[in-house]
Image (cartoon, rainbow, N blue to C red):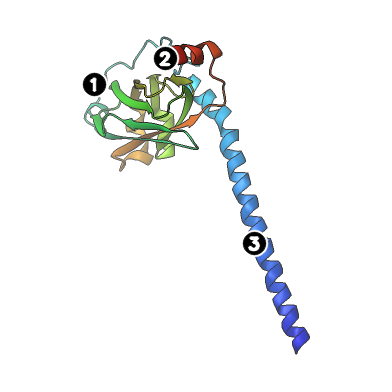
Amino acid sequence: FAIRVQSTVNKKRAMRRRTAWNAAGFGFTMLGICWAMIPLYEMYCQDTGSNQTGGLDIHKDYGPPPSDDPKVSERYIRLEFAGTTGGDLKWKFFPEQRRLLLAPGETALAFYKAINLTDRPVIGMSVYHVIPPEAGIYFNKIQCFCFEEQLLNPQEEVDMPVFFFIDPEFAYDPRFDMVEQITLSYVFFESDSKVPAEYANLNLTQAK
């Protein structure tokens, strides 16, 4: 009987160890998937008009023509905005408006604000996602800051614009007949790029 009890205890310990290793493996796998998705996000962001050169002066210079179809022009969508930071980035980052109401094909301009809360220059980079995810194919950015490195001085704050429209085809997709709200969410992470030495020295000089 004692041997049988010990055998059962050993089996339970082995099961707990396997469960712990499986959970750890799952965590590392998900982390790897997140990092692996960054190049795909970059390609998507580039395809929809984001400037990959580090500035905001390159963008698609067109918008969709206005639609005379009431199915489009009278279909209003509520755009909700969300923003947060990830990792160890000590910034404050948030949308400057909670929501916008617009019709498919109507261009809109929204702003996010970022504030560097540290006493050193910090480079950040953002990713974004759309909810529901299926609506992402209809979300067209004319100008945005996703995957653009943003360098902020100590305590500096900046306004970052997002100029966009919802493709009119959204109104004809039966999957969204009952969808009245889309959420645009950005997450800022600290970039592993090094702050240029001359930039850091400039700030040290200004601080003296």
203 displayed left or right of 73: right
Q: Would you place residue 25 above or below residue 34 in this image?
A: below
Q: Nearer the viewer, residue 156 or 180?
A: 156
Mark closer to the chain start, 1 or 3: 3
Q: Residues within 10 Å of mark 3 (few under 14, many from 20)?
A: few
Which residue in the structure is indicated by mark 1? 68
Mark closer to the chain start, 3 or 2: 3
Q: Secondary structure at mark 1?
A: loop
166 displayed left or right of 75: right
Q: Amino acid at mark 3?
A: Thr
Distance, label 1 to label 2, CA atoms, is 61 Å
At horizontal 61% and vertical 55% (from top left) the residue drawn is: 23
9 displayed left or right of 78: right
Q: Would you place residue 9 above or below residue 199 in this image?
A: below
- The reply to whether discs 1 and 3 touch (Cβ–Cβ < 8 Å) is no
Q: Would you place residue 175 above or below residue 201 in this image?
A: below
At horizontal 68% and vertical 67% (from top left) the residue drawn is: 15
Between circles 1 and 2, the one closer to the viewer is 2
Q: Would you place residue 179 above or below residue 112 in this image?
A: below
Q: Quadrant of residue 32?
A: top right
Q: Quadrant of residue 6?
A: bottom right
Distance, label 1 to label 3, CA atoms, is 59 Å
Q: Secondary structure at mark 2?
A: loop
Q: Secondary structure at mark 3?
A: helix
- The reply to whether discs 3 and 2 touch (Cβ–Cβ < 8 Å) is no
